[in-house]
Image: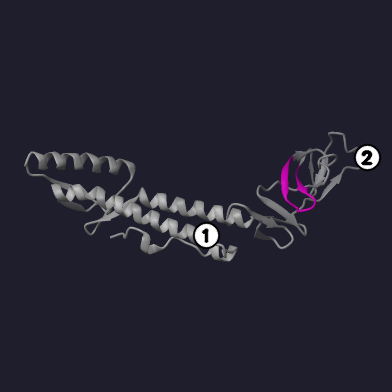
Amino acid sequence: MQAQITYLEGTPLEDDLPVVVDGEPHTSFPFTVYEDATGRALFGGTTMHMRDLAPEGCIAVAEPFVPNSYRKDGVVKLYPAQPFDGATFNHATEMWEDGRTLEQVQADKWTQIKRTRDSLEATSFPYLGKVLDSNSRSVQRINTAVQAAQAAMLADEPFEIAWTCFDDTVLKLDAVGMIGMPAALALYGDQLHQTSRALRAQIYADDATRESIAAIAWPASATAPLP
């Protein structure tokens, strides 16, 4: 609520003398500067007077500054969360709007798809009915274990390893099973890239629209199933 401010009788605005704020004497009071055209809150603080606080095209109001807010019809409101990068807020309708070009919408969607693909590829993959980790450290462990399995096969020695899965269960593997693991990871990675290429073709189709692009999402069937 805007404070009711009254200067004491005979007190010049430029003098550092008390003013009355909501009936109580004060030497300073809070203020907020708003953009006049939109009502967007720009900055605030405390002051002794309202003179020369607002730059051109702005107004100053004696009330506390609220970050990420705007003022409309005398009411200070918080901006709702921005739904996506590039969205602009229409202060007349008080709604977010998509001010991006079609090319920007396509580029943003493709970035989102690639981010999903890369995250899935570096998280987990299916193998022998289990889901295994595929982060960088796990891939190093896979490569090391495969080298050990290959060495054991060349030396005609037995090989067995208990591999910890994504859900912390254990998968026991012999040399052949261990050597097949990176092949399964590569196959899964290729499937992810095939999926992303198919989605990219939809994003950049000649008849693509904002609505059709917004509806494009990573299919659940292209994700490693969790146990």
As measured in the structure, the alpha-carbon distance from the residue carrying label 1 to the one carrying label 2 is 69 Å
In magenta segment, residue 36: yes
Residue at 26% from the left image edge and 52% from the top image edge: 184
Q: Quadrant of residue 224?
A: bottom left
Q: Please tell me whether the stretch drawn in magenta is mainly helix, strand or loop.
A: strand
Q: Nearer the viewer, mark 1 or mark 2?
A: 1
Q: Is residue 88 left or right of residue 159?
A: right
**Where's residue 168, x and y in %?**
24, 51
Q: Which residues are magenta?
A: 30-45
Q: Which mark is residue 107?
A: none
Residue at x 22%, y 53% (from the top left corner)? 169
Q: Which of the two labelled residues, at mark 1 and mark 2, occupies the earlier sequence position?
A: 2
Do labels 1 and 2 touch, CB within 8 Å?
A: no
| Residue beneath disc 2 | 10
Toward the right, the furthest residue is 10
Q: Please, is residue 162 above or below residue 128 in the view?
A: above
